[in-house]
């Protein structure tokens, strides 16, 4: 009996060791990265295309607002949960902050507009990052959240978690 | 041990071998309802979460190979509103699952599950292809009964006694998770990235040719440190997914074919719920999920009851914060 059991456990362990490319004992040591977060940096006055086809610049948004929050969305359920949270829990508390969703996945302005309408976020400006310019510039990925203050300084560049991290930064502006 | 001595209602017109099949039958029934209906989306939700295969009462070993084809078709939002995928999207996950069960003692058995996952996704025009292990699972089960409880006719309270199983499963995060440097979106993952311990219970009763069962699960997910997500290093934090509960009701009807083989048709209804996740102890109210699924399975077992061939389909009916999927599953099992 134990011979078979040992064989079973051996096979099980074999697959874990050989097949698994994940870290089964993850740590919370910071990862050294060359990827630019730009936190603390003064960023360029980037321009972008909105889902209605018009062009805008970061400076235009910051002229009328104290800060800009960019949220990178791929219109998935996780993203929708975050966006819904931003709409209901965060945005109402910061009237002078411009919240903009960045569609870095659609590739065409018309598709961005289609997703924006389909997901029901026509009350937010949505950037169609068709040339991946913002994605590369901010090293954006799914749920990346960036806060830029009036002086073009990046105050936050991280993945959306509970929303508290966004509020904490906005409260300090 | 002669299986014919283990049953409540022996009938002379069926062979002794049939009673051997009786034990196999309800194990098969449980297998169909436990492994197919609660195995849910890998992409977005991680690898499957089945409780594995269940050994028939009078067998010592069993292996199973199954192929799953899971098609994604939109998603339900946190508010439960169905939402189409973005234009030019086609999400598909295929899984090859290897399972092996081994009897430790008369009432104890263990099993392991090894999923191989192939994601072939097109999302908003972007193609991606990811292959790798899913989350492996190790389970141990206790059979809280000594004799097979399947009967042909109810004769008093004794014959109403169900088969009850208690089990626990450990999910090992061997799949490609969001917390690795190998995927940049939730559509490509093959595992959740968390250790989880499930407590399982199955109650099953068969009065030929009918069977009903209920399976309940409660899963506790262990907190883990995170220092990267979707290929992006992040400021380290601790994350804990919410605990999971699942409930599956199943009903089956069995035909005994002229050559003594069996054909079983099983319908099941499953619900899955995951509580909100926590980041450094702070609840993320945008997380958590719910899903309701209906499934139909067909299983054929040979006259000798040593081979089982299965075909099943599961269709998500409703949900919150989770993709809508359809799973087609084919498999083969061998017991000995």
Image (cartoon, coloured by chain):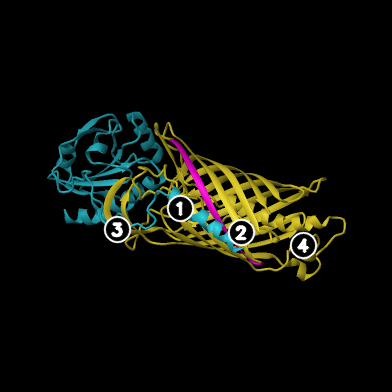
Chain colours: A cyan, B yellow
Mark 4: few, some, or many residues within 10 Å (few <14, many ≥20)? some
Badge 2 crowding class, 10 Å Cα cut-off, few under 14, some 14 to 19, many 20 or more, is: many
Give how far across and how far down residue B64 sits, in percent: 61, 49
Who's the residue at 40% across and 45% down the image? B186
Q: Mark 2 or mark 3, which is nearer to you?
A: 2
Q: Secondary structure at mark 2?
A: strand
Label disc, if present, on residue B102 of the rendered structure: 2
Quadrant containing the N terminus of chain B in the rendered view: bottom right
Q: CA distance from mark 2 to mark 1?
A: 19 Å
Above or below residue A104? Residue B111 is: below
Instruction: Give the number of the disc on residue B3.
Output: 4
Compared across the picture, whether B46 is left or right of B309 comes to left
Q: Measure the C-alpha gap from mark 1 to mark 3.
A: 22 Å
Please check the rendered image and state whether residue A68 is part of the magenta-colored stretch, yes or no. Answer: no
- Do the dots labelled 2 and 4 sit on one chain? yes
Start-end of magenta stretch: B106-121
**Residue B23 visible in rendering:** yes
Image coordinates for residue B21, horizontal then vertical, percent: 75, 55
Chain for disc number 3? A
Dots 1 and 3 on the same chain? yes
């Amino acid at each position: 009996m134990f011979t078979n059991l040992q064989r079973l456990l051996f096979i099980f362990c074999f697959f874990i060791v050989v097949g698994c490319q994940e870290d089964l004992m993850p740590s919370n040591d910071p990862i050294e990265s060359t990827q630019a977060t730009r936190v603390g940096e003064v960023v360029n006055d980037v321009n972008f295309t909105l889902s209605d086809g018009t062009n805008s610049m970061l400076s235009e948004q910051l002229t009328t607002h104290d800060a800009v929050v960019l949220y990178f969305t791929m219109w998935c359920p996780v993203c929708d949960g975050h966006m819904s949270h931003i709409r209901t829990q965060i945005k109402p508390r910061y009237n002078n902050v411009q919240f903009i969703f960045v569609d870095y996945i659609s590739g065409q302005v018309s598709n961005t507009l289609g997703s924006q309408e389909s997901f029901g976020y026509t009350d937010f400006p949505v950037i169609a990052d068709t040339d991946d310019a913002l994605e590369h510039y901010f090293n954006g990925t799914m749920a990346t959240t960036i806060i830029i203050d009036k002086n073009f300084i990046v105050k936050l560049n991280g993945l959306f978690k509970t929303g508290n991290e966004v509020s904490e930064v906005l409260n300090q502006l | 041990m002669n299986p014919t001595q283990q049953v409540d209602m022996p009938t002379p017109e069926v062979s002794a071998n049939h009673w051997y099949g009786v034990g196999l039958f309800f194990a098969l029934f449980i297998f169909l309802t436990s492994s197919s209906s609660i195995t849910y989306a890998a992409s977005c939700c991680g690898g499957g979460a089945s409780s594995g295969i269940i050994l028939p009462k009078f067998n010592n070993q069993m292996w199973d190979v199954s192929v799953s084809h899971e098609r994604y078709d939109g998603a339900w939002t946190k508010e439960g509103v169905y939402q189409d995928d973005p234009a030019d999207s086609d999400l598909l996950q295929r899984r090859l699952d290897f399972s092996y069960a081994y009897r430790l003692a008369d009432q104890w058995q263990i099993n392991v599950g090894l999923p191989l996952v192939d994601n072939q996704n097109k999302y908003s025009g972007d193609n991606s292809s990811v292959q790798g292990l899913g989350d492996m699972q190790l389970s141990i089960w206790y059979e809280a009964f000594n004799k097979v409880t399947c009967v042909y006719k109810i004769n008093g309270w004794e014959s109403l006694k169900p088969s009850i199983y208690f089990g626990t499963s450990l999910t090992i995060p061997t799949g490609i998770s969001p917390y690795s440097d190998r995927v940049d979106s939730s559509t490509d993952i093959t595992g959740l990235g968390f250790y989880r311990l499930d407590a399982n219970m199955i109650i099953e009763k068969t009065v030929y040719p009918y069977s009903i069962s209920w399976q309940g699960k409660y899963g506790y997910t262990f907190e883990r440190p995170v220092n990267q997500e979707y290929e992006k290093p992040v400021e380290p934090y601790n994350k804990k997914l919410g605990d999971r509960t699942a409930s599956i009701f199943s009903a089956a009807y069995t035909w005994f074919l002229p050559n003594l083989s069996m054909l079983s048709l099983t319908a099941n209804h499953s619900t899955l719920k995951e509580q909100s996740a926590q980041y450094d102890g702070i609840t993320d109210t945008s997380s958590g999920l719910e899903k309701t699924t209906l499934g139909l399975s067909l299983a054929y077992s040979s006259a000798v009851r040593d081979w089982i061939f299965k075909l099943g389909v599961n269709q998500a009916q409703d949900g919150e914060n989770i993709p809508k999927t359809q799973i087609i599953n084919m498999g083969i099992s061998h017991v000995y």
